[in-house]
Image: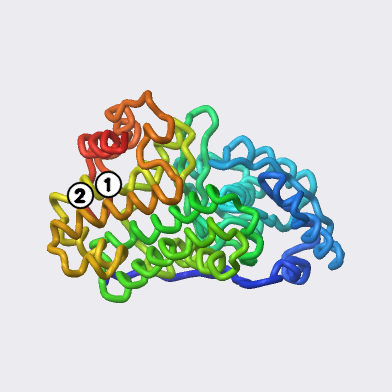
Amino acid sequence: MHNFVFHIPTEIYFGKGTQQNIGKIAKQYGSRVLLLYGSERVVKNGLLGELTKNLQQEDISVYKYGGIQANPLLSKAKEIAKYAIEERIELLIAVGGGSVIDTAKAVSIAAVNKADLWTYYEQGKEVPKALPVGCVVTMAATASEANCVSVLSHDSKKQKKMFAHPQLFPRFSILNPELTYTASPKQTAVGAIDIFSHAFERYFCLEQRGTLRNKLCGAIMQTVVAELPKAMESPCDYDSRAQLMWAATMAHSDMIGTEGVFACHEMSHVLTEEYGLAHGVALAILMPAWLKFMLPWHMDLLAEFAREVWGEELKGCDDVEASQEGIFKMQQFIGRCHLPLSLHEAGINTRNSERLAEKLLTGRDYVGEAFEKINKEGASIIFQMAE
């Protein structure tokens, strides 16, 4: 194992009814709070009203800003930051999933620093200070509630970039699985594939493999495979929702390991930029294509992955059969979750794999650190396999 730093300063409040303590938790950080949210779902189901009431009971002034979309935009973050400055906001609380939390993190930078917000994402600029962020999670997916990562899209440049900085760790996050009940089956599936991908990309990191890490990654992926169908069939199954919610937080808060092979994530950002695909949908298409591409060079590792995740019956197969069957079983699972297996199934018929690869690798030679480096030619092949 290589050296690493493990740091999760976020306080997690997990379980039924935990959102009822929002006022007592929030008053530690200020008396002027801005609730950020996306769709009207949190208004219609009464969650926003409940949070507002609990905050006001602690003499906290509550402000609200909605309309944050999936694949959140730079322009929206700037717009909200301007409002936060005008209203002298002291604490941002994201009510939603990864897009809302990522936006709140962006606002936390823009509201107290003079530099243009996009320079942080584009240049990895240092963040001197940031407004504190809290989270009330309504969607199990990105683990943005417990990490220092924010992903934002530039409106005009059609670029989607990730920025990580210690200032972006949320101060607290409320994880009540009951709040995910109203997520649709498709939203649930898209989020769960993202959870799977975070463990998937850590599993294949050659620099940090070992018994504990491999088993932890495998357990996260097995949890998604076991629990996602239950949550899709029975949206109010508390245990399934709880298993997925905690798996999400574990998978991308470095609890199961730090470094990963994030090639599929980087390629998925290109598909989102070009075609507006949901992040989890893009990953569902790309992960099997990436496995197929890697098969000739890493059949033994792919066979190990297949046996770890897809069942005991593969343990008696040789590496050739196990690795191929593992890819097949993964595609079967994605299909059973009613997600597309190709760009064509996603309704995208005009594409150019070489152009996508060119965009992916602008300014660099490869993606796929700590595994098989993917150059422009390799990326073009994977995009083509995804068609």
Amino acid carrying label 2: it is Met
Q: Which residue is drawn at the image coordinates 61% and 72% (left, top)? A: 14
Q: Residue furthest bottom?
A: 212
In this figure, which residue is indicated by the disc labeled 1? 290
Which residue occupies the extreme top position in the image?
Answer: 350
Q: How many marks?
A: 2
Q: Is residue 173 visible?
A: no
Q: Secondary structure at mark 2?
A: helix
Relative to 173, does residue 43 appear above or below in the rendering? above
* Rendering coords of residue 378 (x, y %): 21, 39
Q: Nearer the viewer, residue 316 or 115?
A: 316
Q: Which mark is residue 117?
A: none
Side (left or right) of 344 relative to 116: left
Residue 281: x and y in percent read: 44, 44
Q: Residues within 10 Å of mark 1 (few under 14, many from 20)?
A: many
Measuring 64% from the left and 38% from the top, which residue is drawn there? 76
Q: Are marks 1 and 2 in contact (CB under 8 Å)?
A: yes
- Above or below, 382 against 265 in this view is above
Tell me the number on the disc at residue 294.
2
Is residue 97 found left or right of 196 in the rendered image? right
Say which quadrant the N terminus sits in.
Answer: bottom left
Q: Residue 112: x percent and y percent?
A: 66, 49
Q: Quadrant of the C terminus?
A: top left
3D distance between C-alphas at marks 1 and 2: 6 Å
| Residue at 47% in and 56% down | 192
Q: In the image, what residue occupies the spot 60% across and 68% down?
A: 238
